[in-house]
Image: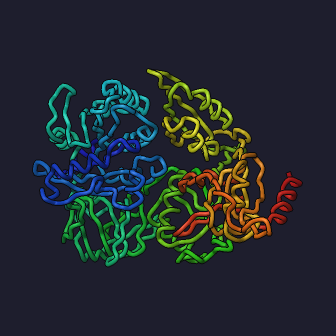
Amino acid sequence: MAEREVAHFRNDIRNIAIIAHVDHGKTTLVDQMLRQSGTFRANEALTDRVMDSNDLEREKGITIMAKNTSVHWGGLKLNIVDTPGHADFGGEVERILKMVDGVILLVDAAEGCLPQTKFVLKKSLGLHLKPIVVINKIDRKDARPEEVLDEVFELFMSLGATYDQLEFPIVYAVGKFGLAKYKLADEAVDLAPLFQTIIKEVPPPPGEMDAPFQMLVANVDWSDYLGRLAVGRIFRGKVSAGDWVSRIKHDGTVVKAKITKLYTFEGLKRTETNEAGAGEIVQLAGMEDIHIGETLADPEHPDPLPIINVDEPTISMNFIVNDSPFAGREGKFVTSRNLRERLMRELRKNISIRVEDVSPDTFKVAARGELQLAILIETMRREGFEFAVSKPEVIMQVVDGDNMEPIEQVVIDVPEEYVGSVIEALGIRKGQMVNMATLNGQAHLDYHVPSRGMIGFRGEFLTMTRGTGILNQLFYDYESYKGAIAGRTRGALISLEDGDTTPYAMENLQERSVFFVPPQTKVYKGMIVGENAREDDMVVNVTRKKHLTNMRASGSDGATQLDTPRMMSLEQQIEWLDDDELLEVTPESTRFRKKILDSTERHRAQKKKEAMV
């Protein structure tokens, strides 16, 4: 605090991040803040969730990448960062918090504090950021704002908040309609109470304009005209377009770079400017290979800032060059060079993943969770890449000779009638119950479960609770290996031949299986076409045709009745994979397949594996 007392401050700026659990209304609230601050013209057409700028974010309804915007209120500029709420994208939250002086902790008035709420709050309290608590969605029928406020206070206490942090201001809001108020009994008209609270409670950033320039790169952006753009907050001094700066890399080496363009954020747009000073969040062009976490400083005083550290990945998948019989038919980028370049490009802008070369055609990608990997896979396929991925595996650690595995904190809300099934399923997956409470027919379960036990569980959970259960998980800690966990309980239907699937062949098989493909689908030998009712794999001929005889035509003797094939999302497909299987991913389709396509070779490899155990 002593440093802040002697520093000069930028009283015209406030830097704040909005943090919350997924789907608690961050992006919707930012929409209303932009509208009510006059950032947009009255007649300007706007889409909902304007901060969710890419297709995947709009489709999934979640924020994936942290983004900057700004609004003007009461003569001050408020730089606002919208952050992801899903635990898999925690790396985005961690680095963005380095740019701000305060946080708005948004909590759903019905759902209360969920795992990611704890995660993001812990990070912000550790950085001594000023919190403002906003209880959102108080218009919900099941809203319980007073109880949720008690939960928030207990969460602050459990995370070791200081006395200053415990004196957090409270605002009640309906973000969807742009309403906020200080007390529940007050009349809400607009978001003025929230804006006023930000201006009053968030400290202005230090603004030592005469000190040597220093800035931390917290994000990178891309422009088709300017290349890579470094995004970060200026901690001290000034910078102008055309200045030479020292770029301090992660290994401590220093290189000179020239700032060719300088931008600040105005609304959702970047605005070119000639000069910016301490406390401002800016974009700088001119450094083609700049990386997140590097420091830009005055050439005469190249002082590095602390490197941004994020929690280590807990799960990995192999990205493999596609070698199936259909390889190269649908993708634009299919070679190992294409695949490696794309993964290296992702590594430069996403500090929470790791990429390792396993072989010339195989790359191990480690991340924080299945969803983060699924987003990367989906993004790459939309860009025209074709490749295959393996089953997710947890990353083990060895501590003092003991095998340690990642453990997830799992929070479940489910109707009481399904509690027995959920407890039994988590018991099989080596889950340990920490707490259980019931209220009004709803059960709240807290569990610690090995990360490998959670792979594939979400789909099973939704099925057993008929879609009524809510499941949230967050990395908890590393603990001693919990022992073997049973894998998938049903085997695969594997195509025996190349060709097109036929209704005639599928009709005879559907009594004891579920198909993943419809009739008239091209398949190849070793491709998985469905799920067997039993735990063993079954090789089947799904291309068999009804031939002409002197008794009947080769056409139909009656209408063939086929069940609708099971359609799975990419996340569900990743969860379904087994150790000896791959998911073939192309811009047009996804296909399950065995790693070894020939059934004889596959059987021989299995015998060899069993003999070695």
Residue 275 percent across, percent down from the top left: 19, 68
Task: Return the residue nearer the eye: 307 or 453.
Answer: 453
**Residue sitting at the far right:** 611
**Residue sitting at the far front:** 551
Task: Return the residue nearer the eye: 239 or 443.
Answer: 443
Taking the image as drawn, is residue 80 in sight? yes
Point 53% across, 72% down: residue: 385
Point 62% across, 67% down: residue: 520
Residue 303 percent across, percent down from the top left: 36, 62
Left or right side of 83 for 7: left
Left or right side of 210 for 400: right
> Is 364 placed above or below 168 here?
below
Point 21% across, 65% down: residue: 276
Left or right side of 420 for 579: right
> Is 593 placed above or below 86 here?
below
Left or right side of 149 for 534: right
Taking the image as drawn, is residue 302 in sight? no
Residue 264 percent across, percent down from the top left: 23, 64
Residue 35 percent across, percent down from the top left: 18, 52
> Is 229 placed above or below 528 here?
below
